[in-house]
Every structure is written in C-alpha cells, then in structure tokens.
C-alpha cells in the first residue's frame, strides 16, 4: 500500500499483479490498482483531471492525461471517500507509476494533489527493483 496526502486529500494506492491476464511469453504484464481518495479537509472538492506517468523496467515512459477517473468526476464533501479500480499493462515484468489529480473547489480554486509513486511488480520479476 502506498499513500500521500496533499491539501488534506489522502490518496492511497493498492496495486495487484494480474497473472491470469498477463502473458510473460509475449512480454505482456497486467496490473490492477485500487485508488482510495479521502477528503480529510473542511471544504468540498471535485476531481477534474488525472495525469499518470508510467515507466517500465526498460525506462520507457507513457503519459496519460484525461478528465476524471473511470468515467467520473467525483465530488468529495468533507469526510467523503471515493474508491475506484483501474489497470495498466507493460511490456516488462515491473515498472512504476506516479501522477496527480487536478481538483477544484466550488469557488473556482484549482490545485493538484499527488498520487504516490507506486511499484508494479510481477511474479516473473526475479529481483524487485522498485
């Protein structure tokens, strides 16, 4: 489990290697990751956009930007929690992901919150470099 708190929004990530969807002989490795967003602040916020930087074990970088997460732009009132699960595929048996979410408040303020850097490791990875 990986966690980071920015602007009183806590982001927790739990990655899981999906052996049943991976095909090491074809250099295809798949992970699911569950994100837990918790508004520990005193103001309502909405997740507007996401940014991911995904780096495989060979150093190849893929960047992903887009509106919301899993088709939603959740609103979190103070104390609210939002969970979702998504996935990533790599051509190497390990890698790392990091990124941020752009949040907004009802009065129009926009700010970024950190997604903690987390490791993607498979059962096929003999040494765990991350």
Image (cartoon, rainbow, N blue to C red):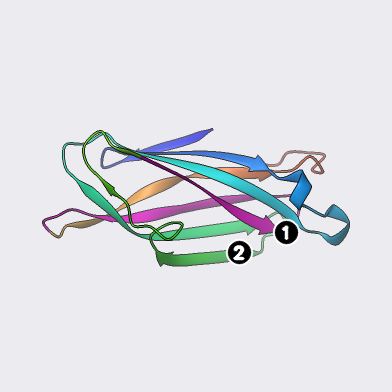
Q: Residues within 10 Å of mark 1 (few under 14, many from 20)?
A: few
Find disc 1 in the rendering and name its residue. Answer: 58
| The N terminus: image quadrant | top right
Q: To which quarter of the image does residue 92 belong?
A: bottom right
- Secondary structure type for disc 1: loop
Taking the spot 82% from the left edge, 43% from the top edge, the residue there is: 124
The one of 77 and 49 positioned closer to us in this rendering? 77
Left or right: where 115 falls relative to 86: left
Query: Which quadrant of the view contains residue 118?
Result: top right
Q: Which residue is identified by label 2?
A: 61
User: Observer-nearest residue: 66 or 76?
Assistant: 76
Q: Residue furthest left?
A: 107
Q: Name the quadrant containing residue 15.
A: top right
Give the x, y percent position of residue 93.
Answer: 76, 50
Label 2 to label 1: alpha-carbon separation: 9 Å
Viewer-proximal residue among 96 and 39: 39
Residue 88 drawn at (x, y percent): 62, 55
Main SS, magenta region, reads: strand
Residue 67 at x, y = what percent? 38, 65
Is residue 1 magenta-colored? Answer: no
In the rendered view, would you say 41 is above or below 97? above
Secondary structure beneath dot 2 equals strand
Left or right: residue 38 compared with residue 105? right
Query: Is residue 90 highlighted in magenta?
Result: yes
Q: Residue at x 61, y 43 (%)?
A: 119
Which contiguous range is marked in magenta?
82-107
Task: Give the vertical position of 23 relative to 81 (above or below).
Answer: below
Residue plotted at (58% across, 65% down) = 62
> Taking 27 as reference, is 11 above or below it?
above
Residue contact at pointers 2 and 1, CB within 8 angstroms: no
């Amino acid at each position: 489990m990986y966690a980071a708190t920015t602007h009183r929004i806590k982001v927790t990530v739990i990655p899981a290697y999906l052996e049943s969807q991976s095909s090491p002989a074809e250099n295809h490795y798949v992970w699911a990751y569950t994100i837990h967003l918790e508004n520990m602040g005193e103001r309502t916020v909405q997740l507007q956009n996401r940014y991911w930087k995904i780096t495989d074990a060979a150093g190849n970088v893929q960047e992903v930007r887009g509106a919301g997460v899993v088709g939603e732009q959740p609103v979190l009132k103070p104390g609210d929690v939002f969970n979702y699960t998504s996935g990533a595929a790599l051509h190497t048996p390990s890698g790392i992901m990091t990124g941020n979410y752009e949040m907004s408040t009802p009065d129009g303020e926009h700010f970024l919150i950190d997604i903690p850097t987390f490791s993607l490791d498979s059962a096929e990875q003999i040494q765990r470099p991350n």
